[in-house]
Structures are given as C-alpha cells and as structure tokens.
Image (cartoon, rainbow, N blue to C red):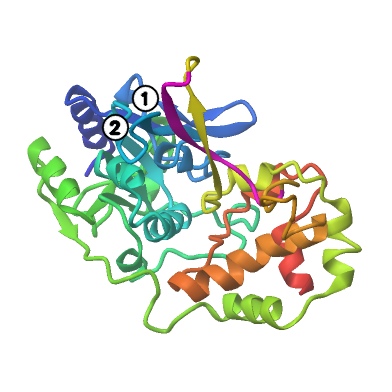
C-alpha cells in the first residue's frame, strides 16, 4: 500500500463515520490527536507521551443508572460510544492491548468500546532505551502474538527516494511490498472488511496465536520476576525509591497497562436514584488500599511502590501469563524525582 493509498483509506474511514486518532508531532512531544485532514496523516516512530489507553478505558465513564426503589435493577446510562480508529500503534504498545484485552475480558463496557474501535498498528519500534527499555525488536513472528485489526509493516527506503520520503511523510518502495510503501496485514474480520470495502485486497491475514511465544517469556523478564519474587531489598524500596517517591501517581496514569480504578455512586439531587461511575485510580495513592474501619493494606510509600513492581512482574504474569510492563519508558519520562524503572530492575 502506498502512502497516498493509506491517506485515502483514512479519508474513506472518516467518511464512513469513524473518528480517527493518530500521533501528531507538537513542540516538545508527540500526542494522539483527532485527525481533521487525512492528507496529513503519517507514521511517527516516537510513541505519543500519553498512550492509547484513554480511548479504551476512559479516565472517567458512567457505567449505569439506578433508582432508589429498584436497586436490583439498573439501566443503561445511554452513553453512545462513537466508532473510533486508533492509528499508528507500535508493537510495544500493541503488547499492552493484548494485556488489557485479558484483564477486561468480561467487562461489557470495555468490550463494547473494542467492538467499536479499529486498531491500526505499525512496525516502527523506537531503538532507544528511553522508549523501548526491553529492546523489543520487530521480528518475523511478533505479529502472531499481538492483537490488531490492521497492521502496516513499513518497508525499507530505497536510496533513490529516501529524500522524497522524508518530505512526503512516509517510507518508499520495496520488493516485499510489491512496489508498496507498507506491507499490510489484518488481524480481524473487521480489518479485512474495512480494507475490502475500500477496494484493497492485497493483504495477508495473521491469526492470533496467544500472547506468549513458544519459547516462553524473555529470559530477562524471567530474571526480573524471580528477583522480585525471592527477595525484598530494603536499601532499594525503603532507603532509595521509597524515600524519593512523592506518590503523585503520574507513572500509573500514563502507563498503558495500569488499570486500577475506583467506582463511586453519584446520587441525584433529590435522592431518587443516581449513576455509578468508574474513574482511573493509582495504587500509589495513600488511600488506595484503605478499607472500612480505616485499615490500610499498603501503609507506606515503600510498600506501595514495591506492590506496583511486584504486580507488574510477578502477579500479572502468574495470573494471565503476560508481563504487566511492556517497556515503553513513559513512567521514567514523567517521574518528577527521576525514578527510572529500567535502573530499578537492573539494581534488583
């Protein structure tokens, strides 16, 4: 698929009522922004500072309505979920989608959003440790273990058109792509039908083979998991990062795999009923583990930050066979006291 065809495909989706969100370079950072002009869409290797998560798990959402005298019955809140396209997700973040799909497998609100979402991934993986701390590589079988509707494999630039590609905003020709700039894969029937309705059938379908490759977890990840499971290093958790952390929660809010939330009932003014809302929360917050009677399961900052690491690298893989960290590096980038997850794991 040429870059011009890709832009026409995005325009086609927009005309059919899809709202498209794509990475956009702004001064100082890359963000997801709603596409207004398909001709300006391009792939960007640097991942957006804020991940795709808010499109699938909103920072706050109304789940249902209830009435005081009918507490055994609930009504749909009548919130209309628009059709949306999340464009340009790299394989690092696509691993996070695999995890969220497992976590929210039985959540009707998440599943409805996924049904109304078209995921378009792409193969540009940052090479720097800052954005890819586990140095994930784009390898031949990686797509079998990712979940997407459409995936664009960027083809190598030919020397003759390298300069023109940088101007046009896309890569150029390649033998593998049969004269295309992107080799196109599909991972769902929705992806296939969208392309075929557009009139494009030169794609290859990839069936999802599960989140973990046949050889199992990456040895480095196993090393981190075992270190967290077997030892508690006071000098790290209490004397170092536990003493530095200010519990702002920025790392959890920006993380594509953090999914902790709080639920609250919001009654109407006359007390006849109300709505139940779900909103993001963070296990770093002082009151996160507090229960009735005032007891807190996680009393100190050190306990909370250790819990966060233990959850990602031990409990989540034990429960759903997926590592709870994809290595995007966003947490280190936004931390006001310079706590770096890669350095913490190395110290373990």
Of residues 296 and 47, which is closer to you in this image? 296
Question: Can residue 33 be seen at all in this image of the molecule?
Answer: yes
Q: Position of residue 223 (x, y in %)?
A: 64, 81
Image position of 158 (left or right of 176): right
The image shows residue 12 at horizontal and vertical percentages of 18, 28
Residue found 25% across the figure and 29% down from its top? 18
| Range of residues picked out in magenta | 271-284
Residue shown at 46%/52% (left/top)? 93
**Helix, strand or loop under label 1:** loop
Q: Pinpoint residue 113: horizontal percent, then vertical percent.
A: 31, 40
| x 68%, y 53%: residue | 289
The C terminus - image quarter: bottom right
Instruction: Kindly identify which numbered label has been placed on residue 76.
Output: 2
Q: Secondary structure under badge 2?
A: strand
Q: Nearer the viewer, mark 2 or mark 1?
A: 2
Residue 134 seen by the camera: no
Q: Badge 1 is on which residue?
A: 35
Residue 95 falls in which quadrant of the image? bottom left
Residue situated in front as seen by the camera: 276 or 130: 276
């Amino acid at each position: 698929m040429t870059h011009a065809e890709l832009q026409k495909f995005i325009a086609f989706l927009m005309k059919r009522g899809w709202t498209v969100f794509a990475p956009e370079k702004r001064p100082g950072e890359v963000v997801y922004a709603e596409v207004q002009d398909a001709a300006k869409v391009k792939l960007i290797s640097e991942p957006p500072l804020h991940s795709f998560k808010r499109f699938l798990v909103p920072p706050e959402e109304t789940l249902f309505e209830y009435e005081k005298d009918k507490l055994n019955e609930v009504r749909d809140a009548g919130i209309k979920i628009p059709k949306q396209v999340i464009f340009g997700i790299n394989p690092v973040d696509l691993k996070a989608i695999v995890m969220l799909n497992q976590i929210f497998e039985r959540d009707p609100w998440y599943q409805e959003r996924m049904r109304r979402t078209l995921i378009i991934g792409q193969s540009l993986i940052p090479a720097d440790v800052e954005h890819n701390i586990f140095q994930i590589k784009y390898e031949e079988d990686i797509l079998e273990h990712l979940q997407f509707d459409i995936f664009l494999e960027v083809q190598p630039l030919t020397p003759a058109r390298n300069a023109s590609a940088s101007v046009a905003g896309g890569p150029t020709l390649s033998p593998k792509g049969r004269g295309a700039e992107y080799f196109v894969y599909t991972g769902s029937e929705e992806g296939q039908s969208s392309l075929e309705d557009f009139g494009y059938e030169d794609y290859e379908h990839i069936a999802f083979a599960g989140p973990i490759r046949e050889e199992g977890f990456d040895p480095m990840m196993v090393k981190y998991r075992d270190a967290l499971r077997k030892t508690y290093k006071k000098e790290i958790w209490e004397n170092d990062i536990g003493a530095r952390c200010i519990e702002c929660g920025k790392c959890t809010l920006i993380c594509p795999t953090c999914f902790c939330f709080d639920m609250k009932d919001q009654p109407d003014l006359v007390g006849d009923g109300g709505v139940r809302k779900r909103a993001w929360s963070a296990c770093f917050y002082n009151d996160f583990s507090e229960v009735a009677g005032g007891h807190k399961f996680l009393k100190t900052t050190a306990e909370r930050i250790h819990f966060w690491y233990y959850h990602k690298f031990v409990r989540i893989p034990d429960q759903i066979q997926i590592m709870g960290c994809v290595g995007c590096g966003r947490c280190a980038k936004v931390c006001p006291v310079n706590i770096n997850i890669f350095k913490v794991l190395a110290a373990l």
